[in-house]
Image: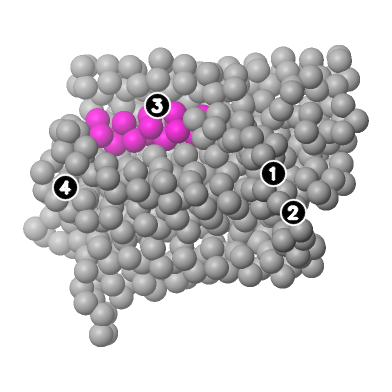
Amino acid sequence: MKKYFAEFGYNLKLAYPVMLGMVGHTLISITDNIMVGKLGSTELAAVSLGNSVIFIAMSLGIGFSTAITPIVGAADAANDKTTLVKALKQGLLLCSVLGVLLFGVIFLSKPLLRQLNQPAEVIALAEPFIDYVALSLIPLIVYQGYKQFADGMSQTKYSLYAIILANVAHVILNYVLIYGIWIFPKLGIIGAAIGTVISRILMVVFMHLITRYSKGLREYFDALPTVSFDREITRKIIRIGIPSAAQMLFEVLLFTAAIWLSGIIGTNAQAANQIALSLASLTFMFAVGLGAAAMIRVSNYVGAQDFKKLRLVAQSVFLLTVFIEIVFALVFIALHQILPEQFLNMENNTQLADNTEVIAIAAKLLIAAAFFQIFDGMQVVVLGALRGMQDVKIPMYITFVAYWIVGFPLCYYLGIKLEYGAEGIWFGLLGSLATAAFLLYARFLYLSKKFIINNKIDNPESAVILPSH
């Protein structure tokens, strides 16, 4: 255990900027939920439905962009500067194209909302909200291109600074645009959507400036004009990026399906689901930060071809994640009655009955969240380690089985068929995440042992960045 504990300090040093940055991403959504929740449960449900559609596109963009980090991390360890410049150029180009495509797909897919059996009043509010937030996907995915490159270079603080700026701007914009402060009109949930667009534009502009002119990364930006379009690096990013995007998509689709199933039960169940999901997402971001640390450190040891150290470092990240998620689980259990009240206006007598029901449901969901986030945290850090090893195809199949062969049927059966409502849906989520965590961990144990025995990586994905192979 001492060997694992000895790695905790560096794991946290590398992970905490990513943790805080991802918490910042989630706070943008939570800020929307809290401020919009003061308008009423219907408005909160509309934002929940709208964001559920946006999150599907975000999962594809963010998942795809993670392919940049292991390529950069291994090239950095091998001191391959040519590959680093090519990965930066092709990564930014691919993220830009993907952001535009995702915006177009979401914008054109709005009519599908009416096929999901959701409350009519919720759909009426959600549709214009989606128009604006879909536009914010373009700067968000471009930002991911910068972020994943910087992360691969172990410069994880830059994205944190960008997220802090975005959050400050978002809170101010939300406040004045949702409620109509000073000279600004009262726009309701549309104000929240416009605030998201502007804050994300500021975020990518700031991220460009801080990485472009940073001491450690400037030379790679300066060298961009000297390299031409590289098909091999492009194919490599796509080969890793598509399965990575699929892994994230399968999970996000399951949670999106949980939102839609809650909408079938009723508006209050959907609002309660959104409250619990917002809080669980906030704590989950700490695990996402550790998952990024696992991906960075593992990719470095791939480049250095030190597979015993790779396994030890990855296991230390897994252990640290479990400790942290247990602490959050205890917090959820202790405060499950108090936390949901922060999202609704309990002084509004016209909404009091609905709000009371929403809080009662959300309190029960937080008990389920306390347990499932331990498995959720575990599966995301193991996925990070596997991505660092550039193993993405088998994990893609594992996540599909866990979320859609096991998870969705459980959610539907417990929540709808057995009529346990939102609680049943969340216990279905718990079953799927536990399945994913155990299967992915088994995959890591098998693969890392194989690398140690063979003293090499025979995964063809890694051949481009390991010249000695």
The chief SS type of the magenta part is helix
* Front residue of 104 and 194: 104
- Label 4 to label 3, Cα distance in Å? 24 Å
- Magenta highlight on residue 169: no
Question: Mark 1 = which residue?
Answer: 230
Task: In this rendered view, identify the residue nearer to me: 92 or 399.
Answer: 92
Q: Amino acid at mark 1?
A: Asp
Residue matched to label 2: 227
- Secondary structure of the residue carrying tag 2 is loop
Question: Residues at badges 1 and 3 in contact (C-beta under 8 Å)?
Answer: no
Amino acid type, mark 4: Val
Q: Nearer the viewer, mark 3 or mark 2?
A: 2
Nearer to us in this view, 138 or 384: 138
Image point (35%, 21%), residue name: 408
Name the residue tied to disc 4: 122
Q: Amino acid at mark 3?
A: Leu
Q: CA distance from mark 1 to mark 3?
A: 41 Å
